[in-house]
Amino acid sequence: MKKRLRRASKRWSAPKLKTCPECGSAVPSHIACPSCGYYRDRQVLSVDTF
């Protein structure tokens, strides 16, 4: 029982997603937006639209 109680706090949780201020899509924290290429109010990726 003690082993199960210790491991109860290590259960899986869904990742927290934030909204991109430029395009409004859901993006994980500390990652550049894959749809528009912005990170912290500046463009860091050049994204080509097809």
Image (spheres, helix red, strand yellow):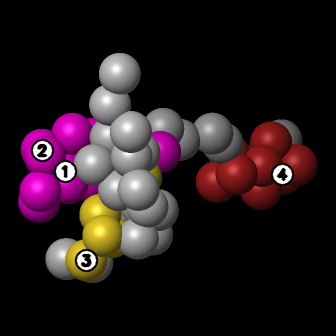
Residue name at image x 13 percent, y 46 percent: 23
Helix, strand or loop for disc 2: loop
Q: Nearer the viewer, mark 3 or mark 4?
A: 3
Residue 45 lies, with reference to residue 1, above or below; the image says below
The correct choice, above or below, for 32 with respect to 23 in the image is below
Amino acid found under the numbered disc labelled 3: Arg
Q: Which residues are magenta?
A: 15-26
Near-viewer residue (23 or 27): 23
Mark 4 sits on what residue? 2
Q: Which residue is mark 3?
A: 42
Q: Calculate the distance from the C-alpha at mark 1 to the C-alpha at mark 2.
A: 5 Å
Distance in Å between CA atoms under marks 3 and 2? 15 Å
Q: Give the quarter of the image for residue 38.
A: bottom left
Q: Earlier in the sequence, mark 1 or mark 4?
A: 4
Mark 1 in CB contact with mark 2 (< 8 angstroms): yes
Q: Are marks 3 and 4 in contact (CB under 8 Å)?
A: no
Numbered disc 1: secondary structure? strand
Question: Taken as a whole, is the magenta stretch helix, strand or loop?
Answer: loop
Q: Amino acid at mark 2?
A: Gly
Q: Which residue is mark 1?
A: 19
- Give whichever of discs 3 and 1 has the lower sequence position: 1
Q: Is residue 16 visible from the viewing direction of this image?
A: no
Q: CA distance from mark 3 to mark 1?
A: 15 Å
Q: Is residue 34 left or right of residue 4?
A: left
Residue at horizontal 64 percent and vertical 54 percent from the top: 9
Give the amino acid type for the residue marked by disc 4 in the picture: Lys
Where is residue 39 shown, x and y percent of the image?
A: 33, 70
Q: Which mark is residue 24?
A: 2
Q: Are marks 3 and 1 in contact (CB under 8 Å)?
A: no
